[in-house]
Image (cartoon, helix red, strand yellow):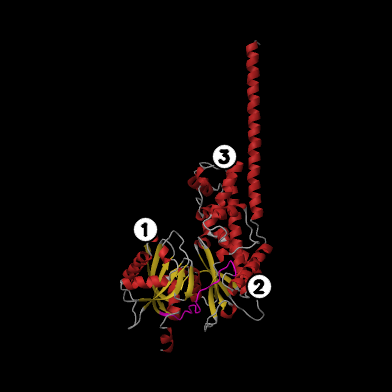
Amino acid sequence: MGKVAVAATVVCAAAVCAASVYIVRRRMQSSGKWARVIEILKVLEEDCATPIGKLRQVADAMTVEMHAGLASEGGSKLKMLISYVDNLPSGEEHGFFYALDLGGTNFRVMRVLLGGKEGRVVKQESEEVSIPPHLMISGSDELFNFIAEALAKFVATEGEDFHLPEGRQRELGFTFSFPVKQTSLSSGTLIKWTKGFSIEDTVGQDVVGELVKAMERVGLDMNVTALVNDTVGTLAGGRYYNPDVVAAVILGTGTNAAYVERAHAIPKWHGLLPKSGEMVINMEWGNFRSSHLPLTEYDHSLDVDSLNPGEQILEKIISGMYLGEILRRVLLKMAEEAAFFGDSVPPKLRIPFIIRTPNMSAMHSDTSPDLKVVGSKLKDILEVPTTSLKMRKVVISLCNIIATRGARLSAAGIYGILKKLGRDAPKDGETQKSVIAMDGGLFEHYTQFSESMESSLKELLGDEASESVEVIHSNDGSGVGAALLAASHSQYLEDSETS
């Protein structure tokens, strides 16, 4: 063999050797990176753990904070707002009532015809109106004039069924889903706007007063009987159909709870005790925080980056606005530290809130053998063209860990309310039923979340007590509930009772 041939053989062998070393190295690197992926997953699982003992600690802390919030203003992270709703619908309500539901960039106007115990809701009609963006940042008069004009147009379409007795004024329940300091059942001052609204001259004003002035300007004669929060509306709607409803919880984009408290158990209440002996409390439970909450590095960074650092901690780990964002933050760490999506981080993965909770729910619900839905969602949202089955399985595991923690903590909160009411354990010789009215897209559409929440609540209560506790879906409390509260607090109620 000539010198050239020998040299070529040596070079060739060296190249083969280098290539195999490169392959081995790549394999070692990739197995090292995969080990890091699994490590990040395991740490998340440990940090999000909600064993039953921890859930009991969270529930106990919730009960303690409820007591503190009822004792004095500012005494707790839970605001425990007095709603001034002391009469929940009984089912006896007659007549027709209006509702106005202002909760975001759209508002809804509705009329409801009530037929008492037999007829219940005989008929309802509603219309949704979009608020032009410029009105969300203009003046108070402009916004409320627009709302009053839409309401007046809706009133003008009343049919024969909706007949008002002679001399009676139309009555309206007003759902206003922004932070308000309620001063009576039909008045409350705006603390601050949220959800993209920024109208300075409304802040500190009575929102009912603003609406009434606008109705007078457009010549609409209507009495605003009740100003309500959407959670209180859900409670009213639930109670109307089921007399055993004691609390309402909204699990949607945000989260909140309201419940029926004994009036004498509210030390900060300084007025005359209501005849009913009861008062609905709007907890604002999204602001709950406790050292027992299982928080992760992702929760801390999300909180720091939020518009309200240090606030709404419970909401940031259990509600629909944030679950998908927690998932994004974990995937970003995996992409940066373990090349989860390959050598470069997908640019879209760096965009906050790009993974929405409905996307997470769709991936979590994927039961196809190759997890096709997970693959297509990652492709559509993050523009990752291909993913392996083992990557998709990791994504499912992340969804499960994040959703299960949120669901189990929601159950702990409900259990805390039941403890506060003394309804967490069976009473000798009593068969008291406790029904929780639930609403919100997270509860309604994220099946794994709602199932985990209900099974966790049963686990906390135990077999015997859980037989007397029921969770029901109370749809559209923020609309119908407001009309029902206008009915149960009607200025004509005594007339109808004495007639």
Please state if 264 lies on the left or on the right of 217 as rendered: right
Q: Which residue is disc 2 drawn over? A: 464
Please state if 489 lies on the left or on the right of 345 as rendered: left
Mark-to-mark CA distance, 3 and 1: 44 Å
Looking at the image, which residue sits at the far top? 2
368 is higher (above) or lower (below) than 58: above
Q: Which residue is disc 1 drawn over? A: 134
Q: Which residue is disc 3 drawn over? A: 342
Label 2 neighbour load within 10 Å: few <14, some 14-19, many 20+: few
- Write down the region rendered in magenta: 75-94
Q: Is residue 481 visible?
A: no
Which secondary structure, mark 3? loop
Mark found first going from the N terminus, 2 or 1: 1
Write the residue at 61% across / 69% down. 65
Can you give x and y, in whole percent of width and height, for residue 432 in the image? 60, 78
Q: Which kind of residue does numbered mark 1 sit on?
A: His
Q: Main secondary structure of the magenta part?
A: loop
Can you give x and y, in whole percent of width and height, for residue 302 in the image? 56, 53
Q: Which kind of residue does numbered mark 3 sit on?
A: Gly
Label 3 neighbour load within 10 Å: few <14, some 14-19, many 20+: few
Write the residue at 65% across / 78% down. 427
Circles 3 and 1 in contact, beta carbons < 8 Å: no
Label 1 neighbour load within 10 Å: few <14, some 14-19, many 20+: few
Mark found first going from the N terminus, 3 or 1: 1
40 is higher (above) or lower (below) than 249: above
